[in-house]
């Protein structure tokens, strides 16, 4: 085989692989959009394009279920989780990344190992705690538990970034008379923008998609459910009908905000992730 | 403006003692330069004065009061860092105003001080720029401006020119000298570059291994080094050292043998040496005479020649020595393989006893107490750097 032919073959193989990967990752989402636009019996056809596209599924999601309220619940829970988690993580990262104290490495490892517990392992204990606090069926229970499981990685990522900031910058601020909090808020925070966008987004996605805690703590009430639980609990006209169209429409609705967020912060995320990885 | 006084100051990091007891007085308006090889503790000493490190033991006074336990912002100091350490997200104006804003000064007062500093440093047209949009020299000027607006008692510079290229370094050196003249401020400056030390300092402090080797005016260190370390560290190229033995001692000096057998009588105080003692003979490359017309001679063969245009360095191998550097004029025709009959004169020779201490010269060099090279008060400042 000539060299050129071999090169051509390798090229073709490469693009076949690329096409396979793209289809593999994008197809489920495409199918969700496709199904969400099919009404009635069209749902049972395997057509790759809806024969008669209709918005009825989208309308029914908001009319038959308190889905708007569910979205608000999720926005509230995820938003507050991100704010609390970032605030605690920035202050913790300042201590872990910039101040020398004994046991720092051990502390970081403990933080990391906490994130390794499977959710199910802490679920029953956490449920008791929430009941004791009187937070069952309240969204605050979710905020507290999401902060618990987002903190380890927000602390870790921000600590890495915090370490990279030049020491002289902090010392210049000290000579200028800045207190630790002023150093964090007026010098470090503006420089940590990409890191905050990255970690904030990851925390938001984690909280937005979380199912197990949400089902356990607030799953009994349509009004307090977050999106994943609400979608799982969608009911059809009869108990024998699964409302596939509605489920697909709801999935598309709640995925779009995430995609928009990622696109907005895309450049920051990429630069942020590599900056953390290469120099860490 | 103010004095700085260190009394038996030490600094340890855990078990490791970095500063081993430093006594030093810095006078009002003095420009003091700390020099020394890497790891000698010069930056640590500066950071102790700044308050960025805690003093392990001893006392540090600024302007007469002990400031050991005061935070940097209350010591009346301002510091210029090697890496500039400008706040990247702030404009030049905000960088300079930051400290004043934290001190809750009025807007008008801040504006006035920043504009004045910008005028002194010719930064007025750059006030709205961000650090990343400026050249190294401009950034360094902003860093200095940030120090000026604080109106400190003492300016601290930590190797401020190390990150600049050679041409800019010379220009900024002149600017710093002019600034010292204009502000009449006490300045402490750390560098490993002995040209910066020689040109800027009223007083040089040579540090080595956490202790002060010698304190004095630049030419005092050059002409009267107290020991082998200072003799080798000050001056470029480095002083030549030749191991030898004392042959005779009298009131007029100490005689030693040179490679090749000739004897030279160095005019030093020989009270503490006897004939037969091992000593080190030192003479600077610029004091060696290629043509050989001198008090004594060393014979050797040239093995490398470096021509710099104005000067020529000949590296010579002589019997019983590793290498002798001879500085001669740019017109010299000396070539590799030439046999040289190098002259040395007694007046520019030094002797060091076995533990490294210099034998004191009998006559003090008149230049050792010379006035520092200064500048006319109405001298034109260096031109603003093009951008």
Image (cartoon, rainbow, N blue to C red):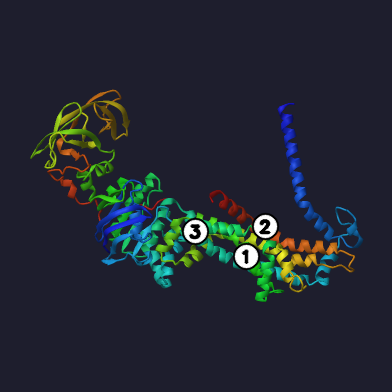
Which residue does the numbered mark 3 point to in the structure image? Answer: A103
Task: Report if residue A53 is visible in the image.
Answer: yes
Q: Earlier in the sequence, mark 2 or mark 3?
A: 3
Q: Which residue is mark 1?
A: A148
Q: Can you say whether B106 is above or below B60 in the image?
A: below
Residue drawn at x 27%, y 65% is: B63
Are the residues flagged by discs 1 and 3 from a single subunit?
yes
How many numbered callouts?
A: 3
Residue ranking furthest to the right: A41
Does the CB distance between marks 2 and 3 fall below 8 Å? no
**Which residue is depicted at the point 31% across and 29% down?**
B305
**First of labels 1, 3 by sequence position:** 3
Q: Quadrant of residue A229?
A: bottom right
Q: Is A34 on the left or on the right of B13, as rendered? A: right
Against B267, residue B103 (above or below) is below
Mark 2–mark 3 Cα distance, whole angstroms, equals 39 Å
Up/down of B83 relative to B61, above or below = above
Which chain does the residue under circle 2 lie in? A
Residue for badge 2: A263
Between A81 and A212, the one nearer to me in the picture: A212
Mark 1 burial class by Cα count in 10 Å: few <14, some 14-19, many 20+: some
Q: Is residue B66 left or right of residue B139?
A: left
Task: Report the chain holding disc 3.
Answer: A
Check whether the beta carbons of the residues at disc 1 and disc 3 lie within 8 A of each other.
no
Q: Earlier in the sequence, mark 1 or mark 2?
A: 1
* Mark 3 element type: loop
Residue B309: x percent and y percent?
Answer: 31, 34
Q: Nearer the viewer, mark 1 or mark 2?
A: 1
């Amino acid at each position: 085989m000539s060299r050129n032919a071999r090169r051509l073959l390798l090229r073709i193989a490469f693009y076949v692989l690329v096409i396979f990967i793209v289809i593999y990752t994008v197809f489920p989402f495409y199918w969700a959009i496709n199904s969400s636009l099919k009404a009635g019996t069209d749902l049972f056809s395997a057509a790759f394009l809806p024969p008669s596209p209709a918005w009825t599924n989208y309308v029914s999601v908001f009319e038959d279920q308190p889905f708007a309220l569910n979205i608000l619940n999720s926005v509230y829970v995820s938003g507050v989780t991100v704010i609390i988690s970032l605030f605690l993580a920035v202050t913790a990262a300042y201590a872990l990344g910039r101040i020398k104290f004994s046991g720092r490495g051990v502390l970081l490892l403990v933080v990391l190992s906490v994130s390794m517990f499977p959710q199910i392992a802490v679920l029953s204990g956490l449920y008791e705690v929430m009941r004791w606090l009187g937070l069952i069926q309240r969204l605050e229970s979710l905020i507290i538990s999401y902060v618990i499981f987002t903190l380890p990685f927000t602390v870790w990522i921000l600590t890495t970034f915090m370490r990279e900031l030049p020491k002289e910058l902090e010392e210049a601020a000290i000579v200028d008379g800045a207190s630790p909090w002023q150093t964090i808020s007026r010098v470090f925070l503006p420089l940590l923008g990409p890191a905050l966008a990255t970690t904030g987004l990851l925390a938001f996605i984690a909280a937005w998609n979380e199912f197990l805690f949400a089902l356990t703590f607030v799953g009994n009430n349509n009004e307090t459910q977050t999106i994943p639980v609400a979608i799982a609990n969608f009911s059809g006209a009869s108990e024998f009908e699964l409302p596939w169209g509605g489920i697909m429409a709801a999935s598309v609705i709640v995925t779009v905000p995430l995609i928009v967020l990622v696109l907005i912060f895309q450049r920051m995320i990429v630069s942020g992730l590599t900056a953390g990885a290469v120099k860490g | 403006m103010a004095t700085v006084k260190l009394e038996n100051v030490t600094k340890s990091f855990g078990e490791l003692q970095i500063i081993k007891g430093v006594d030093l007085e810095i006078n009002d308006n003095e420009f003091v330069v700390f020099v020394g090889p890497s790891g000698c503790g010069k930056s640590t000493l500066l950071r102790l004065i700044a308050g960025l490190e805690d003093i392990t033991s001893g006392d540090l006074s600024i302007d007469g009061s002990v400031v050991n336990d005061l935070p940097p912002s209350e010591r009346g100091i301002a510091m210029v860092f090697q890496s500039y350490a400008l706040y990247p997200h702030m404009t030049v104006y905000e960088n300079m105003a930051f400290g004043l804003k934290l001190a809750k000064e009025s807007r008008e007062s801040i504006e006035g001080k920043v504009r004045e500093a910008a005028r002194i440093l010719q930064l007025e047209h750059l006030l709205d720029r961000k650090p990343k949009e400026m050249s190294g020299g401009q950034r360094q000027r902003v860093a200095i401006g940030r120090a000026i607006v604080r109106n400190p008692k003492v300016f601290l510079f930590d190797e401020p020119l190390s990150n600049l290229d050679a041409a800019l370094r010379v220009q900024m050196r002149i600017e710093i000298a002019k600034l010292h003249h204009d502000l009449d401020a006490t300045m402490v400056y750390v560098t490993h570059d002995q040209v910066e030390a020689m040109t800027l300092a009223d007083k040089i402090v040579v540090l080595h291994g956490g202790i002060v080797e010698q304190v004095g005016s630049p030419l005092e260190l050059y002409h009267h080094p107290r020991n082998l370390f200072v003799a080798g560290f000050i001056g470029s190229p480095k002083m030549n050292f030749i191991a030898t033995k004392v042959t005779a001692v009298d009131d007029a000096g100490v005689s030693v043998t040179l490679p090749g057998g000739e004897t030279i009588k160095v005019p030093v105080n020989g009270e503490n040496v006897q004939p037969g003692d091992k000593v080190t003979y030192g003479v600077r490359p610029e004091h060696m005479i290629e043509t050989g017309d001198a008090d004594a001679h060393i014979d050797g063969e040239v093995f490398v020649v470096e021509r710099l245009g104005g000067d020529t360095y000949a590296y010579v191998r002589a019997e019983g020595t590793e290498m002798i550097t001879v500085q001669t004029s740019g017109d010299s025709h000396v070539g590799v393989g030439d046999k040289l009959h190098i002259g040395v004169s007694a007046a520019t020779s030094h002797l060091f006893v076995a533990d490294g201490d210099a034998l004191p010269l009998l006559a003090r060099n008149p230049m050792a107490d010379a006035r520092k090279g200064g500048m006319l008060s109405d001298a034109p400042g260096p031109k603003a750097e093009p951008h």
